[in-house]
Image (cartoon, rainbow, N blue to C red):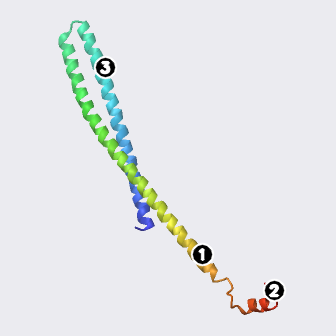
């Protein structure tokens, strides 16, 4: 895989992770709202019973049960989305690791190429000028 491919994959994975985090947050907010609404319905049902309005209390308790059923379904979706988010975080970390490995290899390659390019500037042992200096006793 090329550097560009890894960069593109990393960008897409990060976008997917952000979308998953946003989705999880939205579902968690919805779950909190359903829980609050169910508690409110229960309090209203208690007040209806205190006012001897049994029919209204039953109606409110049925609404509360519907909200609790929605809450359960929403919590299951939250759990699934959390698993997806966790998996996406793993994928992003793996891609980041791969990108770092490629960067290290590229840096090593550039360094080796630079060394190779500059090693040609070094004078060889057979260089006539070096031989002349050695013959004169100058190292």
Find residue 40 and name its label. 3
- Which residue lies at the image location 52% right of the left edge and 65% below the top edge? 104
Is residue 64 depicted above or below 10 in this figure?
Answer: above
Where residue 26 appears, x then y in whole percent?
Answer: 35, 38
Lateral position of residue 45 relative to residue 21, left or right: left
Where residue 34 appears, x then y in whole percent?
Answer: 30, 28
The front one of 31 and 109 is: 109
Where residue 72 appears, x then y in whole percent?
Answer: 26, 31
Q: Return the disc, 2 or 1, that comes first in the chain's sequence.
A: 1
What is the C-alpha distance between the residues marked 3 and 1?
A: 72 Å
Which numbered disc, 2 or 1, marks the residue closer to the eye? 2
Find residue 114 and name its label. 1
Is residue 137 depicted above or below 2 in this figure?
Answer: below
**Residue identified by numbered label 2:** 138
Q: Return the disc, 3 or 1, that comes first in the chain's sequence.
A: 3
**Badge 1 density bin: few <14, some 14–19, many ≥20, Cα 10 Å:** few
Res. 123 image quadrant: bottom right
The front one of 43 and 88 is: 88
The front one of 70 and 116 is: 116
The C terminus - image quarter? bottom right
Lateral position of residue 68 relative to residue 99, left or right: left
């Amino acid at each position: 895989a090329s550097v560009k491919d890894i960069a593109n994959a990393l960008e897409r994975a990060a976008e997917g992770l952000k979308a998953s985090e946003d989705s999880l947050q939205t579902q968690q907010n919805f779950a909190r709202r359903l829980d609050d609404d169910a508690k409110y319905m229960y309090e209203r049902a208690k007040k209806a019973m205190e006012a001897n309005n049994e029919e209204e209390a039953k109606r409110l308790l049925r609404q509360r049960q519907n909200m609790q059923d929605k809450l359960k379904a929403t919590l299951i979706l939250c759990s699934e989305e959390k698993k997806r988010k966790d998996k996406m975080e793993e994928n992003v970390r793996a891609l980041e690791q791969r990108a770092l490995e490629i960067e290290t290899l590229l840096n090593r390659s550039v360094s080796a190429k630079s060394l190779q390019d500059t090693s040609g500037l070094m004078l060889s042992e057979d260089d006539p000028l070096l031989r002349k200096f050695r013959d004169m006793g100058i190292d």
